[in-house]
Amino acid sequence: MNVAVLLKQTPDTESVIRIASDGKSIVTDDLKWIVNPYDEFAVEAALRLKEKHGGSVTIISWGPQRVVESIRTALAMGADTGVLIDDPALERSDSLGVATALAAAVKELNPDIVLCGSRAVDYDMAQRGPMVAEFLGWPHLALAVSVDSDGKSVTIDRPIEGGKVVLESSLPAVVTFGGSHAVWNPRYASLPGIMKAKKKPLAVKKLADLGVDAAVVGAAKVRVTSMEMPLQRAAGKLVDGGLDTAGKAVELVRALHQEAKVI
Amino acid sequence: MGKCVCIIAEFRHGAFRRVTYEVASEGKRLADALGVGLCAVAVGSGVADKAAELGRYAVDKVFAVDDPALENYLAESYVPLVADVLAGCDPAAVVMSASVDGKDFAARLSARLKAGLAQDCTQVVCENGKIKAKRPVFAGKCYGWCEWAEGALPVISCRPNVMDCLAPMEDKKAEVEKVQVSIPQTRSCVKSLDLDTSGKVELTEAEIIVSGGRGMKGPENYAMLEELAKVLGAAVGASRAAVDSGWRPHADQVGQTGKVVNPNLYIAVGISGAIQHLAGMGSSKFIVAVNKDSEAPIFSKADYGVVEDLFNFVPAFTEEIRKLKSSCS
Ligand SMILES: Cc1cc2nc3c(=O)[nH]c(=O)nc-3n(C[C@H](O)[C@H](O)[C@H](O)COP(=O)(O)OP(=O)(O)OC[C@H]3O[C@@H](n4cnc5c(N)ncnc54)[C@H](O)[C@@H]3O)c2cc1C
Ligand SMILES: Nc1ncnc2c1ncn2[C@@H]1O[C@H](COP(=O)(O)O)[C@@H](O)[C@H]1O
């Protein structure tokens, strides 16, 4: 089974986010970059599918040169090849544009299944997976917390508010990954894995190589025009005043009931 | 300029979800600002009989796509059906919920319509006919305002529990038009649906959340939080440390790789307040922290902090709330 994983590089989740002087982007100079956690789950799932069915795992990512490092991380985990779409049109693009380019890269590879994160922990768009599926004309199954395949179809568990659904689709299909570290427990790259990754093939492409018109992809329908920080919370207060445990309980209930009026 | 603001109603298991009323309320404010009417597209089995009630939340007209084959939400069938209805009603903006299904649907629908989507918005404004939507990014570490290109159709999904709900107009009914459709052939399907009937409150919709972290020391101690939650009518959440330890199901995880929640009151018990946890609950209206370490970072975010051993404090607190509830009723 040939698997393609759409992988995005995102700032480390520890990052302090600061707004840049243009007022509509963030300062990236001092950021540490990681593989988007949900995409790491997708890589883990891809490797498990490969272990079961054979075939190959290809990582596809659109971003600047620094993204090579994240693709290599996935290759070190066990993926076979990488494709980096390095084209500045990305900067002017929106989700539709990114998904158009990713769909074109997928078409070229012609995999049996595409796995991706349910959302990237940068702009939290939660858009590209279903969009890529729509552009490919494939079904998609979203927010998987389990995935299984017999080689012809794919089945996932999808948590919804107040329960879960089991979804199934024939292949080819797109699956987006939810869950958390506890669910997927993504493997670490081993030292031999890291050595091997350096020699694995990694193709760099421009949009034109994929037959995608940069002008179309760059014509964003929606864009971020300004950014702002959340309101600083007023300094909270400690429920203390020399009270004992019971006294603090009484005082907290009073404060929540009378001041905050939330209980 | 389109003829109406169109909302997408979420009809599940025989009823509209509450978030649909929030979406209708937000849609109404937008429609008023644009000087157009408010319509809705509602898909589901049996939805046509219930659709008129959306009038209570200011919807003028509902396009009902009703068929037994549409019992369960499936992106592959719902999206083309709704896209066809929208093509017929020329909307100025499309608004829906950023629920689990809503986000999924919004993304695929936008691709089909080639429309720009602002997902999970917390505020929508309209100045001189120009729509702007605000959404949390970087897990709420900051906000981005989205604007649409000239002539582009805005598609907006609204974060649950954020938009103010109109007071229902009890006797108002929406006009319902049953849309004749042919059900699309799909390659995907819903194999089964498992609803939790225990009456558990859903985290993303809860007014109050009690969350426990590594300080809880073991799965058995969550009984104490369940008890507190029961008295408060709250949902129970957890930190990643608790979920990774296998004490709580992953569905309970709050944070950057868990659920982003937005309750009136969030009570963090034995949680240190790591940046990834704060990312999931930092926009709660009131935050209470219970931690025995007065230096824990969670205190810098808490409106009320209690430096205590949770094993002593939680039972005492639960008891006090019980007293308050019985004196109120
Ligand atoms: C990529 C990535 C994603 C992540 N995503 C998430 C996420 O979605 N959600 C999340 O929560 N974390 C997430 N984390 C993990 C996060 O960094 C922290 O490790 C985690 O939140 C810590 O959980 P905790 O506060 O329960 O545990 P700890 O940090 O160990 O804190 C336990 C607290 O309990 C207190 N305590 C102990 N005993 C008692 C007692 N008897 N009475 C009172 N207080 C007591 C201690 O003082 C301490 O402050 C993520 C990390 C990474 C790298
Ligand atoms: N630039 C990109 N390159 C490759 N995959 C991407 C890119 N952007 C988004 N994705 C994929 O789409 C998923 C959802 O991203 P988003 O819509 O940005 O939240 C991510 O988890 C990735 O799998």
Image (spheres, coloured by chain):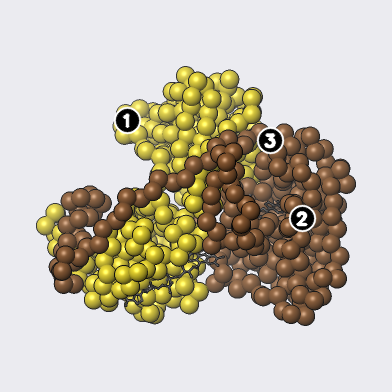
The residue that disc 1 covers is: B169
Q: Colour of chain A?
A: brown
Secondary structure found at label 1:
loop
The circle drawn on residue A220 is: 3
Is mark 2 in CB contact (under 8 Å) with mark 3?
Answer: no
The circle drawn on residue B213 is: none
Q: Nearer the viewer, residue A65 or B288?
A: A65
- Horizontal and vertical percent position of residue B177: 52, 28
Q: Quadrant of the C terminus of chain A?
A: bottom left
- Horizontal and vertical percent position of residue B175: 45, 26
Q: Nearer the viewer, residue A227 or B63?
A: A227
Secondary structure found at label 3:
loop
Residue A220 visible to the viewer: yes
Residues marked 1 and 3, same chain: no
Report crowding for label 2: few under 14, some 14 to 19, many 20 or more residues within 10 A (C-alpha): few
For ligand 1, give the image quadrant: bottom left
Q: Amino acid at mark 1?
A: Met
Instruction: Tell me if A175 is positioned left or right of B237 in this view.
Output: right
Marked residue chain, label 1: B
The circle drawn on residue A65 is: 2
Q: Quadrant of residue A158?
A: bottom right
Residues marked 2 and 3, same chain: yes
Mark 2 or mark 3, earlier in chain: 2
Between the residue at mark 1 and the residue at mark 3, the CA separation in whole angstroms equals 40 Å
Secondary structure found at label 2:
loop
Instruction: Tell me if A93 is positioned left or right of B252 in this view.
Output: right
